[in-house]
Image: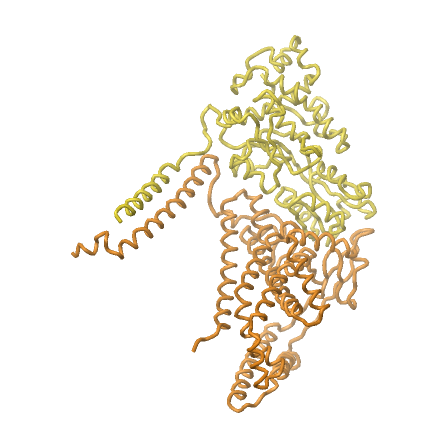
């Protein structure tokens, strides 16, 4: 045995000991809090366990993507809340991105009016606390909407009222075949684009890929309707009288105003930050790059698409990832306006009914953590894909 | 170099020690009341109340709390500390209330809380009595033509508070009637009122006393009415942490004293003069006979102070619930001797 290797003077061991002790100290602290909580809970007659997740929830939820009523379990209620959180986050991220890009580009416009409008939008919406904006969209905008009997009518197809936005219900026959046809269309488009790229790079031929892609996207699903027996019909919302003065809509699908208000508030707020990221990204591309691109004969659209955007995206993506994460986490403010997200359904209602504070809050925190990490992983992958590949 | 490694080893030992010592904390099951000792040391009773429910616990513009729930806190303070004003109020949402109590942030929860089996048995709480017998009802617009819950139809939307028994009763009710409904559950009562007022929902459901109180916050209170049906039993009462039976008894008998005082006609103005009463029950109540306070480690005037400083239950009800127009009729909250169901064990 080589004693020298175990000597404290050995650099490897010297480096290792402080780290090991830090880990030990960290574990001790966690252990301390865990035992302390356990003992205190024991003293107060509170049990710990996750068995409650399979108990009957016995409360209903207004809006759910999966089937749910009070006879399902708390675990299922958690899932309903989680899906609602994911839904509002996806809608919010989608709208915020579109709005953010438009406003960001508008701020760079040479048109004074457009640039100033965009600037005012950014300054106003990013400087008002989000919870106030949520209340504004819910209570102020809600009060402005008419009751069902005087609904804002979109061609008798869709109705916007204070009780929600009623849209037709899609009634599919052979929906699975339609799905396959869509997948087939997307695969064809992918190969078409690869082929077009090859043509361009090898022979300098430019194919009208956009038109062709659109054609495929429309024609293949259309064929499934004509040949494979897929059919789609609609159940239109119908006005229904509840009492002498109150009405509702039946048969259609209701998008509850809580979802609309929350999605609007989240996307309007987050779009301001994304707009600034976009502006920073575009301005971060040197003028010389554009001039060089123009000098080799690219037109304006090509300059933006082939030269400016790929470089701008490198600057835009990392801070925008942060905004996506913020939006997802901010969606937890939903409880204030009764949108049944994970916090309202699980961390408030279920917690209150079961009293399992520690278990439920831990599950909720872990779930938000996983959601955020998933978004991070996806965006890091996208970022890597967009990064300059050093050759 | 050796020195820094020694430091690290010390840190390691220190953290191990920290673990070893971290076994303390928590209440005690012995005869001595830790909560009582702590309350006396602090000089005030830590009481959890609502975030504003007129008649039960509501703060005025200058931050003074009043209501029948607040009077329970005041009674405990009068009994334990000799001064009904020595209360620290913590406004709590429905979701926060039990955690605040079990974690020791408050020692008495007097926040219109429904006594149920699962709450009493499962989560480290003990209900000590009932200070208001309530039941869940529905509020609707007068012009809707709805006169009874039997007029409800499929598709009705109902606003309520989340995390309450209300939400569960609502489901039981609509299920039993086989009515499809849309439950809109808000965290705070104020938002429920706003949403109902705006027309988001067709009906607002909560405890009837709550409906009566919240109706005053609507833009046109007279356009709304509470339906006659009561769909649930809601016995509301103060709650304490499980495991401190002395403290539990103090809170229970502070409330019982107020009700018993009303039964024997003892009120805040005549209490001290009744020390010479011929009725031994009254004499016990005002501390002129027996050693009842000693059982909790209190002096003998504890109940007299409650009656003098807070008043009996009838006075409290009249001041906060009847005179404010919330529920002028006492209904079940009348003494058993007068046709109600208020009945407390004898203080002897």
Number of marks drawn: 0
Which residue is at the front of the view, B139 or A55? B139
- Taking the spot 48% from the left edge, 70% from the top edge, the residue there is A384
Observer-nearest residue: B101 or A13?
A13
Judging from the image, what is the letter of the chain drawn in yellow?
Answer: B
Q: Is residue A235 left or right of residue A376?
A: right
Looking at the image, which residue sits at the far left? A1
| Image: B30 above or below A255 | above
Viewer-proximal residue, B133 or A39?
A39
Image quadrant holding the C terminus of chain B, namely top right
Residue at (51% x, 90% y) in the render: A202
> Which residue is pictured at 36% across the width and 46% down the height?
A25
Give coordinates of residue B301: x percent, y percent: 59, 15
Up the image or down, B70 lies above or below B96; here it is above
Percent from the top left, x then y, of residue A264? Answer: 67, 59
Q: Which chain does orange denote in the image?
A: A
Question: Height in image: A50 above or below A99?
Answer: above
Kindly identify the residue that appears in the image at 74 percent across and 37 percent down.
Answer: B212
Q: Quadrant of residue B29?
A: top left
Tell me which colouring the rendered structure shows: by chain
Quarter of the image for residue B284 reads top right
Estimate the x, y position of residue B278 in percent, counting from the top left.
66, 8
Residue farthest along the bottom direction in this orientation: A203
Percent position of residue B72, x then y: 63, 27
């Amino acid at each position: 045995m080589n004693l020298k290797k175990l000597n404290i003077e050995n650099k490897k061991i010297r480096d290792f000991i402080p780290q090991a002790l830090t880990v030990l100290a960290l574990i001790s602290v966690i252990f301390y809090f865990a035992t302390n909580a356990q003992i205190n809970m024991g003293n107060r007659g509170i049990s710990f366990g996750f068995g409650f997740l399979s108990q009957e929830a016995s409360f209903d939820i207004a809006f759910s993507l999966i089937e749910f009523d009070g006879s399902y379990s708390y675990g299922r209620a958690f899932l309903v809340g989680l899906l609602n959180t994911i839904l509002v986050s996806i809608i919010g991220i989608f709208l915020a991105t579109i709005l953010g890009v438009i406003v960001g580009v508008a701020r760079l416009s040479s048109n004074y009016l457009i640039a100033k409008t965009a600037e005012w939008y950014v300054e106003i919406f990013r400087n008002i606390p989000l919870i106030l904006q949520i209340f504004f969209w819910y209570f102020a905008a809600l009060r402005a909407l008419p009751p069902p009997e005087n609904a804002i009518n979109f061609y008798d197809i869709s109705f916007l009222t204070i009780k929600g936005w009623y849209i037709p219900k899609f009634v599919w026959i052979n929906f699975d075949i339609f799905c396959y046809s869509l997948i087939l269309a997307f695969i064809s488009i992918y190969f078409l684009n690869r082929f077009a790229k090859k043509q361009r790079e090898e022979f300098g031929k430019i194919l009208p890929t956009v038109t062709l892609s659109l054609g495929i996207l429309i024609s293949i699903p259309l064929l499934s309707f004509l040949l494979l027996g897929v059919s789609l019909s609609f159940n239109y919302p119908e006005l229904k009288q509840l009492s002498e003065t109150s009405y509702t809509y039946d048969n259609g699908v209701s998008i509850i105003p809580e979802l609309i208000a929350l999605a609007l508030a989240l996307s309007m707020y987050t779009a301001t930050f994304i707009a600034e990221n976009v502006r920073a990204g575009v301005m971060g591309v040197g003028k010389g790059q554009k001039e060089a691109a123009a000098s080799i004969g690219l037109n304006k659209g090509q300059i933006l698409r082939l030269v400016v955007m790929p470089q701008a995206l490198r600057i835009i993506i990392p801070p925008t990832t942060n905004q996506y994460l913020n939006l997802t986490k901010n969606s937890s403010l939903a409880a204030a306006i009764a949108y049944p997200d994970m916090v309202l359904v699980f961390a408030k209602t279920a917690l209150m009914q079961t009293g399992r504070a520690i278990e439920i809050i831990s599950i909720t925190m872990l779930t938000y953590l996983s959601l955020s990490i998933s978004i991070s992983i996806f965006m890091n992958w996208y970022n890597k894909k967009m990064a300059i590949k050093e050759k | 170099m050796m020195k820094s490694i020694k430091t690290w080893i010390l840190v390691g030992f220190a953290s191990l020690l920290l673990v070893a010592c971290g076994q303390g904390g928590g209440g005690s099951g012995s005869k001595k009341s830790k909560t009582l000792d702590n309350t006396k040391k602090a000089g005030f009773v830590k009481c959890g109340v609502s975030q504003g429910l007129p008649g039960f616990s509501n703060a005025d513009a200058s931050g003074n709390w009043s209501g029948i729930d607040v009077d329970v806190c005041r009674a405990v303070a009068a009994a334990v500390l000799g001064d009904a004003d020595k209360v620290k109020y913590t406004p709590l949402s429905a979701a926060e209330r039990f955690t605040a109590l079990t974690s020791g942030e408050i020692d008495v929860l007097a926040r219109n809380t429904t006594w149920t089996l699962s709450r009493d048995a499962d989560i480290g709480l003990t209900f000590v009595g009932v200070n208001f017998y309530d039941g869940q009802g529905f509020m609707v617009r007068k012009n809707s033509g709805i006169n009874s819950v039997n007029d409800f139809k499929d598709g009705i939307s109902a606003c309520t508070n989340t995390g309450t028994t209300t939400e569960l009763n609502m489901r039981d009710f609509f299920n039993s009637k086989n009515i499809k409904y849309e439950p809109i559950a808000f965290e705070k009562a104020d938002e429920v009122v706003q949403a109902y007022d705006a027309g988001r929902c067709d009906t607002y459901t909560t405890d009837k006393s709550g409906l009566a109180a919240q109706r005053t916050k609507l833009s046109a209170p007279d356009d709304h009415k509470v339906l006659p049906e009561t769909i649930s039993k809601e016995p509301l009462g103060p709650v304490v942490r499980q495991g401190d039976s002395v403290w539990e008894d103090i809170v229970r008998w502070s409330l019982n004293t107020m009700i018993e005082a009303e039964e024997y006609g003892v009120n805040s103005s005549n209490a001290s003069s009744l020390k010479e009463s011929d009725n031994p029950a009254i004499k016990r109540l005002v501390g002129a006979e027996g050693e009842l306070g000693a059982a909790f480690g209190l002096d003998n005037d504890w109940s007299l102070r409650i009656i003098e400083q807070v008043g009996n239950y009838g006075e409290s009800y009249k001041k906060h619930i009847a005179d404010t127009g919330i529920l002028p009729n006492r209904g079940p909250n009348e003494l058993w001797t007068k046709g109600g169901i208020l009945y407390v064990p004898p203080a002897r």
